Image (cartoon, rainbow, N blue to C red):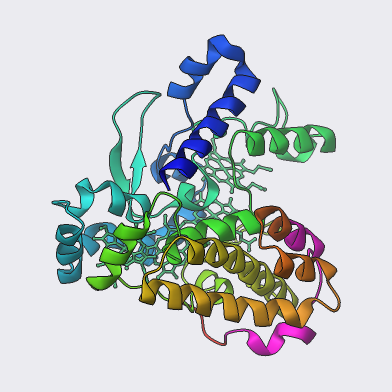
Amino acid sequence: MRDSRFLKFAGLLWAVMMVFGWSGALSSASAAPFTVGPKKCQECHTDEAKVLSGTKHFTSLKTVHKDKRAKKIVKAIGDKRMKKSATCKMCHYTEAQKKPGAKRKIVAGPSCESCHGPASDWITIHNDYGKGVKRATETAAHKTERLQKAEAAGMVRPSKMFDVASNCMSCHGLAASGLDEKTAATMLDNGHPLNPDFELVEYSQGTVRHRFYPPDVTANKEMTAAEKSELYVVGQAAAFVSASAAVKKSSHEKYVAAQKKRIATATAALEAVKGSVPAAGALLADPSIANGRALADAVKGKDLSGAVGGMLPSKYK
Ligand code: HEC
Ligand code: HEC
Ligand code: HEC
Ligand code: HEC
């Protein structure tokens, strides 16, 4: 465990040095991307913020720490309060920061940047049409470059649905890379939920749905059956990658059983589409992030309802 974490850290440091050179490595390490909080996003994204405020992600800030189970779980892992516990903060809260190096403060439950990535380095890039230019007059080349820059700065765009879904799976699958085996086991033994049936369509098309796309940006659009089938497959791909990694890091009975159930459900979905989408077969053979992304690209715009329509939920959370 410790070794693999060190390797990850060393890899990251190496990447930073490749980009900034030796001299910049230390200063840029302290300027790692940070979370700015949903109030910043709300300044422009009022509709999305309104949707967020109607979700359990939003309301849980005021409720979850008062739950009887919460107090028991925090104690069991050796922490005092949920809002002070680094473990709980990983998934339950958004900690915002005003500027690099400033103090982090809990400002929300899971929120915009939990799914779209910490925004300090992309918030002023992703919407910058250029001086004097408006959305309607921006050139296609400028738009491509702008969005590429935003992604390079850590933005998880809706078009990269595998990555968005992987963020959901990391929290909802109790599979966050920072969560060690022992802590996860203690959480489960003390009543922390782990729902192996968390499925992307069911959980994203109810309270969480925000799809204010042009031409009518005031309408929160429902997905078509074809779009839902595509999303279902991408969600199962992300669950497959997440659970395949998680199952290896623990020997805790309940944890392993839940991850195996996630793998079984995802396997059925991937088996159902692999005839028409070879990338699904490649992912089944090797559950890597790269193969997950490749599958998401391969199904883009495809109507897979013939293959997985029967697996889609009829109600949404
Ligand atoms: C100053 C205004 C402004 C702020 C602040 C802002 N955005 Fe945006 N955002 C925009 C505009 C404008 C667009 C549309 C850009 C375009 O036309 O491609 C956009 C687009 C997006 C998109 C869709 C991008 C895509 O892939 O098409 C996401 C996701 C997003 N913003 C998230 C956020 C989040 C999260 C925050 C807060 C951390 C935030 N934005 C803060 C103005 C803003
Ligand atoms: C890896 C992510 C993750 C970590 C770490 C985590 N939780 Fe959770 N927690 C979740 C998710 C996701 C849910 C919702 C599960 C569901 O409803 O299926 C949840 C639900 C809960 C619930 C039930 C809330 C309800 O409304 O039913 C309690 C209580 C809780 N967590 C307490 C804690 C405490 C205390 C800690 C820190 C010791 C913690 N959690 C750490 C992801 C996490
Ligand atoms: C639970 C994860 C999650 C949270 C929280 C979240 N988003 Fe999203 N966001 C998504 C997903 C998934 C999509 C893709 C929707 C689609 O295309 O079906 C998306 C799409 C978008 C889009 C493009 C569609 C649109 O509505 O214009 C914008 C902009 C956006 N999000 C901004 C935000 C902002 C701002 C917040 C916070 C107020 C936020 N998101 C919170 C997951 C999330
Ligand atoms: C940073 C961690 C995190 C991420 C990322 C995340 N969630 Fe959650 N989500 C939670 C936690 C924690 C809860 C439980 C809150 C509580 O009960 O107090 C929750 C609850 C929910 C609920 C309410 C469930 C219910 O039974 O009422 C839905 C729906 C949901 N999440 C959907 C999603 C979707 C869809 C995504 C990805 C697009 C996502 N979440 C990403 C942490 C996260």
Question: Measuring 68% from the left and 72% from the top, which residue is drawn there?
Answer: 233
- Nearer to me, 294 or 223: 294
Question: Measuring 49% from the left and 40% from the top, which residue is drawn there?
Answer: 118
Indicate left or right for 241 with 68 as reference. Answer: right
What residue span does the magenta drawing correspond to? 294-313
| Residue 216 visible in this rendered orientation of the protein | yes
Question: Measuring 65% from the left and 58% from the top, which residue is drawn there?
Answer: 162
| Residue 119 visible in this rendered orientation of the protein | no
Residue 305 covered by magenta stretch: yes
Q: Is residue 124 above or below residue 83?
A: above
- Nearer to me, 158 or 169: 169
Indicate left or right for 162 with 67 as reference. Answer: right
Q: How many marks?
A: 0
- Nearer to me, 140 or 288: 288
Q: Is residue 6 above or below residue 79?
A: above
Q: Is residue 126 above or below residue 226?
A: above
Q: Residue furthest bottom?
A: 310
Give x and y (percent) for residue 70.
20, 64
Indicate left or right for 313 with 84 as reference. Answer: right
Give x and y (percent) for residue 150.
64, 36
Question: Measuring 29% from the left and 54% from the top, which residue is drawn there?
Answer: 88
Residue 295 covered by magenta stretch: yes
Q: Give the main secondary structure, helix, strand or loop, of the magenta stretch.
A: helix
Q: Quadrant of ligand 1?
A: top right
- Nearer to me, 114 or 227: 114
